[in-house]
């Protein structure tokens, strides 16, 4: 896909016709080409000229009359004269959608491309520009003029594909991205939409026709005002990892990127969105640091492996001195953690080595204690405390020699912005 990349060239036009090119011109001049197609044979000679202007320089040099615009041209058949129609088609195809940046491409039938290729061989040009690249560029310039939007490959809002084989423009509306951090204050909320296992989202008696296992999710709560404001068809939620449904997400929250698919409006007041989210009467989710984002940030968020801090409530008959001793020991050794039973159905069964980076008891009463711990990314904290029937080794339970049970778990911090 070519971009209208020559827009903005400001050097004074220049053109010189080498002897070899003069011979090519002589072979091509009487073939009934239009000035656009004739000029394009010399497209890579000189700069700052349109192809018809180039054609004029060449015909002048040969002492030949200027060539016409020629709807009868054997190469393009007058295609370049019909660019205004293609501009209208582009603008119409994107009606009802907000766009400020765009890219143009085109689909050609092979026959038309072959005609040009044959001509190049017959006349022997080394300087030709393909009709497709010239068409894309000229279309881009004229769409810019008609719409006030900026052409180019840099972060387009829409991509136009002029399909010359059927005379139609297809438009692709690119997603809109917003990033932020969420805090989850509720122990019944999954991070993303959770389709009903039985009906896979179609709706059945098990899910009461909703198609969902849980009535709502962080994703749905966060996306709701954005879907309304942008008219997007749907959303995708990319979190930097996820917490268990029954774990709260506290501290500065968890980074996410919200992807709005096929938005009709791209100008969104983020402060207003934050305000709407803050008005959730149930206060289940809080959103911080909303900011515009770009597609590549999704990858960064998905691939980040930050350490995490947790607060863990534990039930177990063990003196606090013994817990402290065990924690000291735990910090000095690696943990071999086999994929937990509870996630074995969706993760491959293997043993990973993880570390607890810091740990301390923050509260202890009879038969209960609360820990703050910081771990490497990917550590299964519940299993590290309880042992998972020996699948995590050593576990806190094995170190204190007493069965332990996690009563609650909160994520206190995702350490993504620390080195
Ligand atoms: Zn032509
Ligand atoms: Zn169902």
Image (cartoon, rainbow, N blue to C red):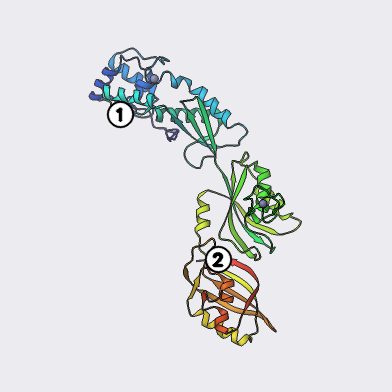
Q: Is residue 87 above or below residue 304?
A: above
Quarter of the image where one finds residue 312: bottom right
Q: Is residue 370 above or below residue 117?
A: below
Name the spot of residue 27 as percent of width and height, x first.
26, 18
Q: Secondary structure at mark 2?
A: loop
Image quarter (top left, top right, bottom left or bottom right) of the N terminus: top left
Residue at point 60%, 37% (across, down): 98
Question: Label 2 belongs to which residue?
Answer: 415
Q: Secondary structure at mark 1?
A: loop
How many residues crowd mark 2 within 10 Å: few (<14), some (14–19), many (20+)? some
Q: Nearer the viewer, residue 196 or 359?
A: 196
Q: Is residue 401 above or below residue 213?
A: below
Residue at point 49%, 58% (across, down): 303
Question: Label 1 belongs to which residue?
Answer: 127
Tag 2 or tag 1, which sits nearer the N-term? Answer: 1
Name the spot of residue 309 as percent of width and height, x first.
58, 70
Quarter of the image where one finds residue 313: bottom right
For ligand 2, tell me if the residue under mark 2 lies within 8 Å: no
């Amino acid at each position: 896909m070519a971009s209208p990349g020559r827009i903005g060239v400001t050097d004074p036009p220049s053109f010189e016709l080498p002897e070899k090119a003069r011979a090519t011109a002589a072979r091509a001049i009487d073939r009934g080409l239009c000035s656009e197609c004739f000029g394009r044979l010399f497209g890579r000679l000189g700069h700052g000229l349109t192809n018809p202007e180039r054609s004029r320089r060449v015909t002048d040099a040969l002492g030949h009359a200027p060539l016409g615009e020629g709807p009868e041209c054997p190469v393009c058949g007058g295609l370049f004269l019909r660019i205004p129609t293609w501009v209208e088609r582009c603008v119409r195809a994107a009606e009802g959608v907000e766009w400020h940046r765009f890219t143009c491409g085109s689909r050609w039938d092979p026959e038309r491309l072959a005609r040009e290729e044959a001509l190049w061989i017959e006349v022997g040009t080394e300087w030709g520009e393909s009709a497709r690249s010239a068409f894309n560029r000229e279309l881009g310039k004229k769409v810019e003029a008609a719409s006030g939007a900026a052409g180019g490959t840099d972060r387009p809002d829409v991509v136009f594909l002029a399909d010359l084989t059927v005379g139609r423009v297809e438009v692709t509306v690119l997603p809109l991205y917003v990033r932020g951090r969420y805090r989850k204050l509720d122990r019944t909320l999954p991070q993303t939409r959770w389709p009903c296992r039985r009906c896979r989202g179609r709706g059945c008696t098990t899910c009461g026709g909703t198609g969902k296992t849980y009535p709502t999710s962080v994703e749905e709560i966060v996306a709701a005002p954005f879907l309304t404001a942008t008219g997007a068809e749907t959303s995708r939620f990319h979190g930097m990892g996820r917490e268990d449904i029954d774990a709260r997400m506290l501290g500065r929250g968890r980074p996410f990127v919200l992807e709005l698919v096929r938005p009709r409006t791209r100008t969104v007041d983020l402060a207003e969105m934050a305000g709407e989210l803050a008005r959730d009467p149930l206060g289940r989710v809080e959103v911080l640091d909303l900011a515009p984002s770009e597609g590549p940030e999704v990858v960064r968020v998905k691939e980040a492996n930050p350490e995490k801090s947790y607060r863990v409530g534990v039930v177990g008959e063990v003196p606090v001195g013994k817990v402290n001793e065990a924690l000291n020991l735990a910090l000095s050794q690696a943990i071999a953690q086999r994929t937990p039973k509870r996630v074995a159905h969706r993760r491959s069964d293997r043993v990973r080595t993880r570390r607890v980076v810091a740990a301390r008891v923050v509260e202890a009463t009879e038969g209960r204690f609360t820990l703050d711990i910081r771990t490497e990314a990917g550590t299964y904290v519940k299993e590290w405390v309880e042992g998972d029937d020996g699948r995590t080794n050593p576990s806190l339970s094995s170190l204190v020699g007493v069965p332990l049970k996690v009563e609650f778990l909160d994520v206190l911090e995702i350490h993504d912005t620390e080195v």
